Amino acid sequence: MLFRSSEEGVLGRQCGDLEEEQVWKERGLEEETQSAQDSVEGARWPAMRAACAPAGPAGANQSWARDFVLLGFAHLPALRPLLAALFLPLALGALGGNALMAALPGLDRGLRAPMYFFLRQLALAELCFSLAVAPRLLDTLLRPGRGVSPAGCALQLLLVLGCVSAECFLLAAMAWDRCVAICRPLRYGALVSPRRCRWLAAACWLAGAPVALVFTLWLFSFPFCGPRGVRHFFCDIAPLLSLVCADTRVFEANVLAATVLIMIVPFCLIAASYAGILAAVLRMRSASGRRKALSTCTSHLIVVTLFYGTTGVIHLRPKASYSPESKQVVSLSYTLVTPMLNPLIYSLRNKEVKAALGRVCRRIRGIHIP
């Protein structure tokens, strides 16, 4: 989603060519290695983008005929098995924890409040995101150099953009729910009705879907030339743009506008909700009431801080201040670490979730023990 200049794209392609050359050597494909070397030589000429841009339907078909190669952590080839062993527990924790949080409200009647309905939707978004990224990450580390079809890469990008967009709006909806519960407690049941919650959740899921679909189709309509080394462990807009042989300035401007719309607008809504919550808490006379009100918001506030703190480093940081390798490391925070921590935050800090989990465990134990 980063806004890149044409010069940065050429430099990214040159570096990607060198890393992909190493991957082809590992696979033992000498012909592909020679082709990558020729492409690196050609990338030194300033007019390469214009020269290799295909014209017409035949060029577009050829652009879809070749696989991409994910070069995640290609600069650390000796550490790939160790990284895979380290990331596997994180991925399993993210998948298992979010699956449990998504299923728990349906297994226990004590979690029927609107807050847990939105928590279930957030867990589903995190689960879909983890399923889209984690398996490909582990496969890239254990089997480097394996190709990814353009259709598979486009599907992964579509899922990533859709899930991240849905999570932004769901976090804003959860903040609104807490704001109504604290600021308008007497009208909470009428304002946050089950029907309104369902409509709001559907809007959160559908709001980012058209944006994700449009930008995925738009990006993959561009011609790709030269080696297909993607300097990331999943298909993202920025590393894919560095492989495009066309003028992408209009596309990049629209990506920037969509990033601001999808990330900053929900963040402003969250900030406004917490401003209302803080004003209501300061008006409370009882210290125990203030603590109780703030305790219901703590878990959500921690999750919002983790989400925007990690994604903001990637998407709102100046482009020249980090390398693609450092971006891969930071991306791990919101692709593996945050999805794993979110279920722990809500389960360990919420007495109702812990009580419901205990009831479900006792019920399952009672079924299996005569």
Image (spheres, rainbow, N blue to C red):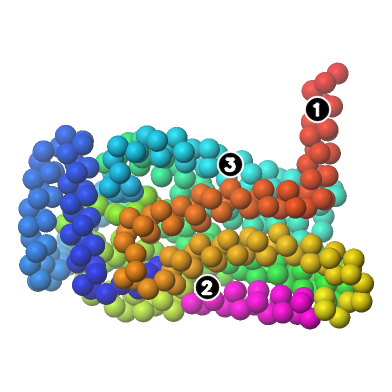
Q: Dot 2 surroundings within 10 Å: few (below 14), some, or many (20 or more)?
A: some
Number of the front mark, 1 or 3: 3
Q: Earlier in the sequence, mark 3 or mark 2?
A: 3
Q: Which residues are magenta?
A: 260-279
Q: Main secondary structure of the magenta part?
A: helix
Question: Is 129 on the left-hand or right-hand side of 79?
Answer: right
At horizontal 53% and vertical 50% (from top left) the residue drawn is: 337
Alpha carbon of mark 1 to alpha carbon of mark 3: how far? 22 Å
- Look at the image and tell me in which quarter the N terminus lies: bottom left
Q: What is the three-letter code of the residue carrying label 1? A: Arg
Q: Quadrant of residue 25?
A: top left
Element at badge 2?
helix
Q: Which residue does the image show at 24% across and 69% down from the upper left?
A: 8
Foreground tag (3 vs 2): 3
Tag 2: amino acid: Ile
Where is residue 168? Give x, y as percent: 58, 67
Question: Residue 59: where, in percent of width, then height?
Answer: 17, 61
Q: Position of residue 4 (x, y in %)?
A: 30, 72
Q: Which residue is mark 2?
A: 262
- The residue sitting at 47% across, 41% down in the picture is 87
Q: Which residue is mark 3?
A: 93
Q: Quadrant of the C terminus?
A: top right
Residue at image coords 51%, 56%: 334
The residue indicated by pointer 1 is 365
| Mark 3: secondary structure | helix
Q: Are marks 1 and 2 in contact (CB under 8 Å)?
A: no
